[in-house]
Image (cartoon, rainbow, N blue to C red):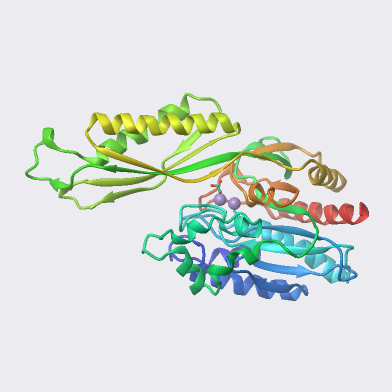
Amino acid sequence: MERCDVLGACSEEPEQLTRPFASDAMRRVHEHVAAWMRESDLAVRRDNIGNLRGRYESATGEGSTLLIGSHLDSVRGAGKYDGPLGVMVALAAVQRLHDKGARLPFAIEVVGFADEEGLRYGTPYLGSRALAGEFDLADLELADAKGVTMAEAITSFGGDAKRLADDRWAEGELLGYVEVHIEQGPVLEARDKPVGVVSAIAGQSRHSLTFTGVAAHAGTTPMDSRKDALVAASMFVQAVEGYAGSHKGLVATVGQLAVRPGAANVVPGEVTLSLDVRHADNDIRLLASERLIDIAQEIANHRSIALTNNLISQNPTVPCSPGPTALLARAVEAVGYPSLKLASGAGHDAAVMAGLTEVAMLFVRCKGGISHHPDESVTEEDVAVAIDVLGKFLELQAASL
Ligand code: GLV
Ligand code: MN
Ligand code: MN
């Protein structure tokens, strides 16, 4: 818990926690986490994309590897547990082994992923996509709000953007990937359980839409001859809420809006906005995304405004793997709790890692289900349960080999 406080203070903004991919705040986080890893005799390295990886060797120095981790980046105005808690719980479980002088028949690699939220470049999962060998090299050309390309950001963070393919796991057989994460929803609290086992991770689509009208003088341009891009965008924002609200299980969000030129006395000429669409069923999500883009086009046509749509990223719904998930459920029961199963509406690195290896996830109860907000909160008791469960999982995994 103290370590999460320390990491939570590493931010790009003084008033709130904002820790984007390859930022100075991330550099400070790496210094802390690498030092804690070394205390438990983990061999630490950073790969090209900027994942921090700490390896705890097996008893023989050979055999397969279990990956355990989560992400170290954050959204804007974040809480301090979304991501870092999973890395700290992994570290705590390994620290217990180290303190007992115990080595397992398999190696453990604790991974602090470089980017899961996609705050800086809009595309999520940069870290896990590199490790899973699914990184899209075209993303290297994307620019952040200041015009810095992803390739430049990687280079200045110390990675080699030309060698991202080297980040793909190539260190031998994998036992799987396990991630501990706060639930970010209300189920565990409502069911009065400290932890739960994740059944599946809901898919998501992210689009960037630009409405282009004509910037004009706010004092001299009559109301009936304007092509105000922001009015069109605003109508779309309302339509998104209405559409998602009337389709069960669908959530859709406009979370970013850039208004240009952005002056009080200028009619907005151009608006770029983000659209995030999610549903547990892939077909429903894809259909909803298509329909929402159609609605945007209808609004634009009606107001004689141009519209462009870019698909930024798309991830299908991913079921967690039966083997390690059953083992995790056994670990929860062995620690003394019923193994409640629940689905994740939020995205997680595990969804991408499922393309590389088997995955399992443990959720930890969080207060009020609040997340992506500074009020994110977990109790020390629940975190202790999560560390016990992960420790038990390692024991069961070792016994099953
Ligand atoms: C990550 O937190 C996401 O679900 O967007
Ligand atoms: Mn998040
Ligand atoms: Mn997260």
Residue 125 placed where, x, y %? 57, 54
Image position of 61 (left or right of 352): right
Q: Is residue 244 above or below residue 360?
A: above
Quarter of the image for residue 224 reads top left
Q: Nearer the viewer, residue 394 or 134?
A: 134
- For image coordinates 74% across by 52% down, the residue present is 178
Q: Is residue 35 above or below residue 243?
A: below
Quarter of the image for residue 275 reads top left
- For image coordinates 54% across by 68% down, the residue present is 162
Residue 76 placed where, x, y %? 46, 55
Q: Which quadrant is home to the N terminus?
A: bottom right
- For image coordinates 70% across by 52% down, the residue present is 356
Image position of 255 (left or right of 322): left
Image position of 295 (left or right of 344): left
- In this view, which residue lies farthest toward the left? 220
Q: How many marks?
A: 0
Residue 382 placed where, x, y %? 72, 50
Q: Is residue 364 above or below residue 343?
A: below
- For image coordinates 88% across by 71% down, the residue present is 101
Residue 287 placed where, x, y %? 50, 29
Q: Nearer the viewer, residue 80 or 400?
A: 400
Image position of 226 (left or right of 118): left
Q: Which quadrant is home to the C terminus?
A: bottom right
